[in-house]
Image (tube, rainbow, N blue to C red):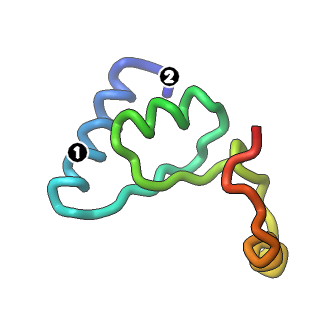
Amino acid sequence: MTSHQDAAIIKAIIAMAQSMEIKVIAEGIEEKEQFNLLQKMGCTYGQGFLFSPAVPPETFAQMIKNGAPLLQN
């Protein structure tokens, strides 16, 4: 998030989705600070390089099968 306006828009989208009982997936999370802010805003799920680079479906299935951590520090 690059500005106060960006954060306000994201917060409004999350609030709207929550009022409609829709879970939210944030895409493109690259930094821990982004992840923390999205969690505080009530974002349900996230994906991005913070968690893992893009991998082929077969690799992802194997990662899940092997119990790969959801967040790498």
Which residue is denoted by mark 2 in the rendering? 2
* Residue at image point 44% right, 39% down: 39
Is 35 on the left-hand or right-hand side of 50? left
**Residue 59 in the image, given as x and y percentages of width and height:** 84, 74
* Residue at image point 63% right, 31% down: 32
Viewer-nearest of labels 2 and 1?
1
**Residue 36 in the image, given as x and y percentages of width and height:** 51, 32
SS for tag 2? loop
Is 47 on the left-hand or right-hand side of 37? right
Q: Tag 1 or tag 2, which sits nearer the N-term?
A: 2
Q: Residue furthest front?
A: 67
Amino acid, disc 1: Ala
How packed mark 2 is, by other alpha carbons closer than 10 Å (few <14, some 14-19, many 20 or more), is few
Which residue is denoted by mark 1 in the rendering? 15
* Closer to the camera in the image, 6 or 32: 32
* Residue at image point 29% right, 46% down: 14
Amino acid, disc 2: Thr
